[in-house]
Image (cartoon, rainbow, N blue to C red):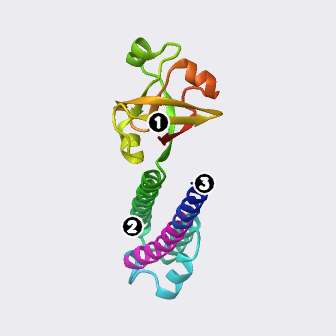
Amino acid sequence: MDDECQKLLAEKEAIIRELQEKVKELEAKLKSYEIREVYKGIIPDDVLEEFVKLPPEQMIIEIGRYLREKGSTGQVEAKKTVNDVRQEIASVEEEVSKAEKEIEKTISTITGAAKTKVGVDLTFTQKYDYEGSDVAFLAEDIMNAIGVKEGEYVSVKKNGTVNLRVLPYSKEGFIVVPTWVREKLGVKVNDFVEVVRR
């Protein structure tokens, strides 16, 4: 199981690196395209080509300087275009983030394990937080990711392991465990633990 997890993690990291390289590539292409479109006919192509190679802040300064020297009023358009490019970049980064989350879900489904944050809940405290309690509230998204149903047992791991029966929890990405479990595992609220399907 450990070898399989390591292999999946290595694959995940490779995919993330590949996606990040694609984001950088797309950023450069997008920046170049947008700048050329806005300044077509205002700034010669060969000058634009040099501006596009600069970092965004430096590029804005150089374009503004060029336009001032030429007496053009195109600075407002340049700032608008840079904002458009930044919005596009943010959109691509959001897609990468979604892809990373999907990869994590896939790995969790295959391995039956997921990292989740320890939380607190008043209802849980009143009903289930006592010595010897074997109940945990587990986020429904985590339950689905590792393939467990209400009433089934999971192993909660950090500095040790405790087996607990899960009840669905509406807050995504969290697990609520009894105080004695937190003490045994050496975790505090908002620490991460590994939850493994049994």
Above or below, comparing residue 184 to residue 11 in the picture:
above
Query: Which callout, 2 or 1, points at the residue further toward the start of the chain?
Result: 2
Q: Which mark is residue 163?
A: none
Of residues 58 and 15, which is closer to you in this image?
Answer: 15
66 falls in the magenta region: no
Say few, some or many: other residues with alpha carbon within 10 Å of mark 3 (under 14 / 14 to 19 / 20 or more): few
Q: Which amino acid, mark 2?
A: Glu
Mark in the foreground, 2 or 1:
1
Say few, some or many: other residues with alpha carbon within 10 Å of mark 1 (under 14 / 14 to 19 / 20 or more): many
- Judged from the image, the secondary structure of the residue bearing numbered disc 3 is helix
Q: Which residue is mark 2?
A: 77
Q: Quadrant of residue 174?
A: top left
Measured from the top left, where is residue 44 in percent x and y? Answer: 47, 86
Q: Which residue is mark 3?
A: 2
Q: Which residue is mark 1?
A: 154
Residue at screen point 53% across, 66% down:
20
Q: Which residues are magenta?
A: 16-37
Q: Which amino acid, mark 3?
A: Asp
Mark in the foreground, 3 or 2:
3
Q: Main SS type for the magenta part?
A: helix
Left or right of 13? Residue 165 is left
